[in-house]
Amino acid sequence: MFRIRITKRQEPLGWSSCLVLAAALALSLALSGLLLSLRGTPALDGLSVLFRGAFGSRFAVEDCLIKAIPLFLCSLGVAVAFRLQIWNIGAEGQFALGAVGATWVALSFPGLPGFILLPAMISMAALAGGLWGMIPAILRQRLKTNEIIVTLMLNYIAILFLDYLVYGVWKDPTSFGFPMTPEFSPQAVVGKIGSTSINWGLAHCLVLGVLVWICIRYTRIGFELKAAGDSVRAARYAGIPYDRLVVMVMVVSGALAGWAGFIEASATINRLQPSIMVGYGYTAIVVAWLARLNPLSIAVASFLLAGLRVGVENLQLDLQVPAAFGGIIEGLILLTVLAGGLFTSYRVAVRRK
Amino acid sequence: MRLLKALIVVMMSLSLSTAIAAEKELNVGFIYVSPIGDAGWSYAHDQGRKALAEMPGVKTSYVEAVAEGPDSERVMLNMARKGYDVIFATSFGYMDPMLKVAKQFPKTKFMHCSGFKMADNMGNYFGRMYQARYLSGMVAGGMTKSKTIGYVAAFPIPEVIRGINAFTLGVQAVNPDAVVRVVWTKTWYDPATEKEAAKSLLDVGADVIAQHQDSPGPQEAAQEKGVYSIGYNSDMTAFAPKAHLTAPIWNWAPFYKSVIEQVQKGTWKAESVWPGMDTGIVDLAPFSAMVPKELQDKVMAAKADIIAGKNKVFVGPIKDQKGAVKIAEGVMAPDQDLLGMTWFVQGIVGTTE
């Protein structure tokens, strides 16, 4: 007989945790390959088409980076809140309001030069997203409401508000009644980097990512976040202003999601329309957990998840695998990686009795 | 003599190369907004794609469940880069992305369904579904006892509004006092939401449920309540045999075949086409046995009139919800007005916002 003993690790697992992650990914891919072969698609062919579609050419990598930009910003935002154990499920709505804010500036002052207009759009987007994040934070600290439910419900309100605007007051008069705003003026569009198809949003991600990382790692606020995230009572006892901290992380969280909304509206769609909402705010939660709330890992995870989404399209096109398969792979990866977390924080020993 | 020989060789090689060009396999790509297994909109288009796949020298593929906006742009780019010769995009929101891609790939032929923008290598197409809607409205009007008909609709855009108006005119043609109540779901494909929307209409006394949705959810809701229903896209009898009366349906195969034949012959031009019931692109599904013979004959007579061009559906006097005459007596609304329709006819309960 065998006995399995699970004990908590006293010291964090160093580089071996990468091994656990790699094993988890390999397991999920092996399971995906198995599923592919069950439906009659050669497993290795399928996985190779998936990878080539995602990372196999310059175009593919560019496509992944473009898709990773909004995902990264939303995910960075929710990760900041999650570090304090504040469950912000509202990135989707904060993203929507960010897009609305940026659009308002773009439509109201189309003639301004780009170096004034773009910062104004960014500020408005961050402000709108941040305020939308602040509401549940204040409600939570003052009225003890549950932030999961409030942020989730505020998503619907924000998206309906966006719909109201594009179906109503902001509707392009030349669009035959279809819901979309007029196209932004060229000054209101974030340009592309050199000869690539990637927009400058990538640089925004880099700067914001580094800023958040520095804040978390090297500042007092970063330390307070960690302390209060581990234990609210201990933090209060130590004199950390917990209420203010909650409001702050929700504002930052919302502002980052709003910034993502600005980039989507300005750089990739060049206008506001309902199809701007494709669920980045919800996918961001998955990314944040896969990355264990670490900014650098979030960058990697959002790139890989974007790659998965792009690769699955290639898989459909070349081998006619159904779209639902992409969701299955995504689910498998999340499941195995989170389950792999057991091995990084616990020691598992098998002994013969 | 030598010159002549040389000329003959050149001529022969030229003719040979054109013969090879003619035999080159034509790659045709489709991009769908919802999964193809849903008996709905994408399913109907995919039936057309399958008919193309049986043509000699034609290879087809598709990508399903692609969100409108940046995701669709990437999928179309990927198809164009892989050398697809003809690309069909079958949702309104694919219009702007397709236009962007069409400009980058002038040799690829692009066909967009349901929009209005064009380019030298991008045409658009649609079918006069409102004709079949009118006929299905007659069936609903003839079968309702409560004089309340429920209509589950996706988005308040001209295509859907036009369909609801034509349906209502059909209802009023046989039952002048009946009202049509509209509920918007703001989704093309979400079986649960569609079913809930249908239930809300049943709760206010609707005894026939019609839909502009891509899943059979509303049909199931009608059957569970024991009332009648009108399907959409394809014959949905299998999903609700005790409720389903008939359905306005799409038959894309003949149209898609004619486009591909034009491409093969080299006669394809970017055009805007809107064929009607006379070409068979739209039709009415077979009646259920629950529809009395008398009503069936009446509807079939109206169908013959539509095919013969005697009944144009949108012929005045037609009033809007406030009672203002929108289409004057004896006037046939021009296509331009139909394509940009944003108002409801009298007899509809609901708003277009």
Image (cartoon, coloured by chain):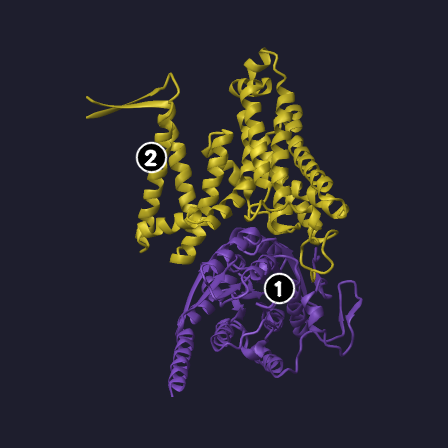
**Chain containing the residue with disc 1:** B
Please tell me how crowded label 1 is: few (under 14), some (14-19), or many (20+) other residues with Cα within 10 Å: many
* Element carrying mark 1: loop
Q: Which residue occupies 53% across, 20% down?
A: A226
Observer able to see residue B240? no
**Chain containing the residue with disc 2:** A
Q: Quadrant of the N terminus of chain B?
A: bottom left
Instruction: Give the colour in which the image draws chain A.
Output: yellow
**Horizontal side, residue B238 vs residue B294: left or right:** left
* Residue highlighted by disc 1: B115
**Horizontal side, residue A25 vs residue B131: left or right:** left
Name, please, the residue furthest toward the right.
Answer: B324
Q: What residue type is labelled 1?
A: Gly
Q: Position of residue B39 (x, y in %)?
A: 47, 62
Q: Where is residue A265 in the image (x, y as percent from the top left)?
A: 64, 47
**Horizontal side, residue B13 vs residue A143: left or right:** left
Instruction: Give the colour in which the image draws chain B.
Output: purple
Q: Where is residue A209 in the image (x, y as percent from the top left)?
A: 56, 31
* Residue highlighted by disc 2: A23
What's the distance in space between the residues labelled 2 and 1, CA to CA?
A: 48 Å
Against B314, residue B157 (above or below) is above
**Horizontal side, residue A66 vs residue A164: left or right:** left
Please tell me how crowded label 2 is: few (under 14), some (14-19), or many (20+) other residues with Cα within 10 Å: some
